[in-house]
Amino acid sequence: KNEVEQSPQNLTAQEGEFITINCSYSVGISALHWLQQHPGGGIVSLFMLSSGKKKHGRLIATINIQEKHSSLHITASHPRDSAVYICAVRYRGSTLGRLYFGRGTQLTVWP
Amino acid sequence: EAGVTQFPSHSVIEKGQTVTLRCDPISGHDNLYWYRRVMGKEIKFLLHFVKESKQDESGMPNNRFLAERTGGTYSTLKVQPAELEDSGVYFCASSRQAYHHIQYFGAGTRLSVL
């Protein structure tokens, strides 16, 4: 059973706005991934987290292991950030690489 | 370094026909994964190869799906016979190690079964 929940499902923003996408999961994990998929494009890995916070350019990913929650933030959003953002987890205790995915968040940034 | 490549990018077939999808992982990546996204649903795991061995095939929906990875290089996923509910986007991913390593995804194959 998939227990990875993302919110919101759809998000519209004006260029320059600060964006937050949330991901929650129900059981212990060993790693959480944030992925990006542009329309018609492949899936790109943005971050892999097991604790704390990571930053890459305008993107910041945080994870709270106790709360079983992660957030992806985009600062100074731009129309090229428009994409589907997907959260995926690997459950703790699994030695295999299998990922469990959320349904994704469709982000649209207007100029 | 070439990324994960998938072929074809789009396949349209009729119910009952056979389709074979191909995935070429990044060179040197022993781990290869197949995933599928059905319309409106989340991406779901199908199976995981380590080199040429099936490490985990618990996500394969039924025996109409056959995956192979001869020689531990490229992989094929055959659907025979295809049914309407098999329509979706099939993604392949590869990683150097299975644990705590980023998976690199291909662009996917969009399968439409009519």
Image (tube, coloured by chain):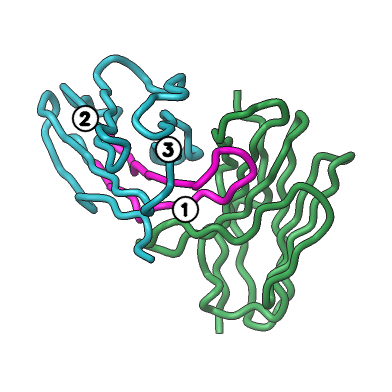
Q: Earlier in the sequence, mark 1 or mark 2?
A: 2
Under circle 2, the secondary element is strand
Where does the magenta region start and end? Answer: B87-111
Give the x, y percent position of residue B72.
Answer: 32, 37
Tag of residue A51 = none
The image shows residue A79, relative to residue B16, as above or below, that is: below
Residue where numbered disc 3 is placed: B33
Residue at 44% across, 31% down? B48
Q: Quadrant of the C terminus of chain B?
A: top left
Give the x, y percent position of residue B24.
Answer: 29, 49
The chain letter for the residue carrying disc 2 is B
Establish whether labels 1 and 3 are both on one chain. Answer: yes
**Distance of label 3 from label 2 (alpha carbons):** 14 Å
Residue where numbered disc 1 is placed: B104
Frontmost of labels 1 and 2 is 1
Q: Mark 3 is on which residue type? A: Tyr
Q: Colour of chain A?
A: green
The chain letter for the residue carrying disc 3 is B
Under circle 1, the secondary element is strand
Residue where numbered disc 2 is placed: B78
Q: Quadrant of residue A42?
A: bottom left
Callout 3 crowding tier (Cα within 10 Å): few <14, some 14–19, many ≥20:
many
